[in-house]
Amino acid sequence: MTRREGKCLCGAVQVKGDFEDAVTACHCTMCQTWTGGGPLYAIRVKDDLQVTGEDALQAHHASDWGERVFCKACGTHLWWKMQGKPVAFVAPGLFAGQGGMTLTEEIFVDHRAGWIAQAEGASQSTEAEEMAKFEAYMKGQNT
């Protein structure tokens, strides 16, 4: 876990908090569209995320449960979270100092673009495996 401070491209949104150093790459088709072709890279928020510049935040509900948030001033992708829940995953590109981060997990690998190589040493899971985890999580939320 590392304490990090970061910002969007224009600086309108700034974030500070404790984050895992493990990076996840999501290859789902929504993430590919959102990033312009590659996976969405994300690190998990470990502690309360402090955000300044809330007036520059724009949320897009890309599914019935997920929310993608970006800076409406410069378009920087900021984070992904479950609707109505705290921020879960933040884009590592917000942080100037990315030392210590390691790509440890790739998800939705059955949708990985053919021109992107598998990350050596990273765990791999398919859409079916990720959706099973999500369904188990949602079932636990409803009990």
Image (tube, helix red, strand yellow):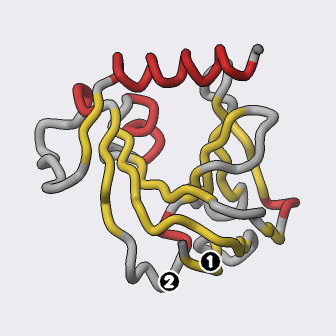
Q: Indicate the position of residue 73 as horizontal and vertical percent values.
A: 71, 62
Q: Is residue 56 above or below residue 133?
A: below
Label 2, label 1: how far apart the Cα atoms are? 7 Å
Q: Which residue: 76% across, 47% down? A: 86
Q: Indicate the position of residue 46 as horizontal and vertical percent values.
A: 64, 61
Q: Earlier in the sequence, mark 2 or mark 1?
A: 1
Residue type marked 2: Ala
Find numbered disc 1 in the image and state the secondary structure of the residue it sits on.
strand
What numbered label is drawn on residue 6? 1
Q: Please name the residue that numbered disc 2 is placed on.
A: 96
Q: Indicate the position of residue 91 as horizontal and vertical percent values.
A: 52, 60
Density class for disc 1 (Cα within 10 Å; few <14, some 14-19, many ≥20) is: some
Residue 65: image quadrant is top right
Residue type marked 1: Gly
What numbered label is drawn on residue 28? none
Find numbered disc 2 in the image and state the secondary structure of the residue it sits on.
loop
Q: Do the residues labelled 2 and 1 touch (CB within 8 Å)?
A: yes
